[in-house]
Image: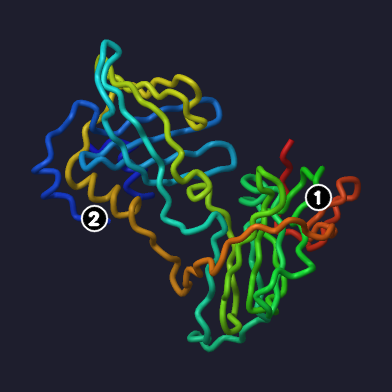
């Protein structure tokens, strides 16, 4: 019977691996681990080709991410492992464009930017956005949300009028980091999302495998010391299923992933009102939401 954590990873996470599986020695820590807490469920598949697949549901975040592991030593405390996350996305800002044309023959609505504001409110609440037909940073870059806002809609829309889309977030050293996308000719619709995976690219933490159990150390995901317990074995078929969805990037049907054209710093941006700021007293939004949730 397939282990539930392996089934979850297989559904969520592309490489044929039967030959690799047959040729790679099976270390004792290879397998799938699962950990549950009050507010999170985590599955970690450690695979024999020095890759891993992480699946986690933590609060409002649903995380599925690949990574690489290496054995860094062995001592009286067990086998030392280093886990490093990698990203399938080229930017923390994810832009999908609907392909031009209307193959269904149905009436096409006005082009829109469809924004997953639930993801932005969780991962990058201080994001700013603007658009223009010029590649120069527009003067109307504005935040999605108000600084003290704690009520958010799950999705919002904006008119799609321009060729270039700009996103920004504060840099640690001051100023702003700007990412520019060129969507080319007008599209029917553009979907905008955030990638937790890209934000955590190259994040690493240590693991210790001792007495048949894996202990995670120094990870924001796992806390300072979290026991993942013993691994459940994985068949070659299960490894194939996990890798298919973990290392490959499957695009939604009819959509094209738009890669960022440029990333650059900006010293300052004009102070503009929030695009989706909410009046908490009256429950009003700049744009009517489909659903509203609050973050304390």
Lower position in the chain sequence, tag 1 or tag 2: 2
Pick whichever, 7 or 233, lies toward us.
233
Judge the density around disc 1: few (<14), some (14-19), many (≥20) Cα neighbours within 10 Å. some
Judge the density around disc 2: few (<14), some (14-19), many (≥20) Cα neighbours within 10 Å. some
Residue holding disc 2: 15
Q: Position of residue 100 (x, y in %)?
A: 52, 84
Q: Is residue 73 left or right of residue 125?
A: left
Q: Which residue is drawn at 79% across and 68% down?
A: 139
Q: Position of residue 55 (x, y in %)?
A: 42, 41
Q: SS at mark 1?
A: loop
Which residue is farthest left?
A: 23
Which residue is farthest right?
A: 281
Q: SS at mark 2?
A: loop
Position of the N terminus by quadrant: top left
Q: Is residue 212 above or below residue 250?
A: above
Position of the C terminus by quadrant: top right
Total marks shown come to: 2
Give the numbered dot on residue 146. Answer: 1
């Amino acid at each position: 019977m397939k282990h539930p954590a392996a089934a979850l990873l297989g559904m969520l996470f592309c490489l044929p691996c039967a030959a690799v599986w047959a040729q790679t020695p099976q270390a004792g820590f290879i397998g799938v681990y699962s950990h549950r807490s009050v507010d999170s469920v985590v599955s970690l598949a450690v695979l024999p080709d020095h890759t891993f697949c992480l699946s986690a549901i933590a609060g409002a975040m649903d995380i599925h991410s690949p990574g690489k592991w290496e054995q860094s030593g062995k001592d009286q405390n067990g086998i030392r492992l280093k886990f490093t996350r990698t990203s399938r996305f080229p930017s923390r800002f994810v832009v999908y464009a609907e392909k031009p044309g209307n193959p269904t023959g149905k009436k096409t609505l006005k082009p829109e930017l469809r924004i997953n504001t639930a993801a932005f409110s969780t991962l990058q609440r201080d994001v700013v956005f603007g658009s223009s037909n010029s590649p120069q940073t527009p003067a109307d870059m504005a935040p999605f949300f108000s600084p003290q806002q704690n009520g958010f809609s799950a999705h919002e829309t904006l008119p799609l009028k321009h060729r270039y889309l700009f996103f920004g977030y504060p840099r640690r050293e001051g100023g702003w980091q700007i990412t520019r996308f060129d969507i080319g000719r007008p599209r029917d619709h553009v979907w905008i999302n955030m990638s937790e995976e890209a934000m955590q690219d190259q994040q690493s933490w240590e693991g210790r495998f001792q007495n048949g159990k894996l202990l995670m150390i120094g990870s924001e995901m796992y806390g300072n010391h979290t026991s993942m317990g013993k691994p459940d074995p994985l068949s070659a078929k299960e490894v194939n299923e996990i890798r298919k969805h973990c290392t490959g990037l499957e695009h939604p049907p009819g959509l094209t992933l738009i890669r960022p054209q440029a990333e650059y710093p900006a010293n300052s941006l004009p102070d503009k009102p929030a695009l989706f700021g909410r009046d908490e007293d009256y429950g009003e939004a700049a744009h009517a939401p489909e659903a509203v949730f609050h973050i304390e």
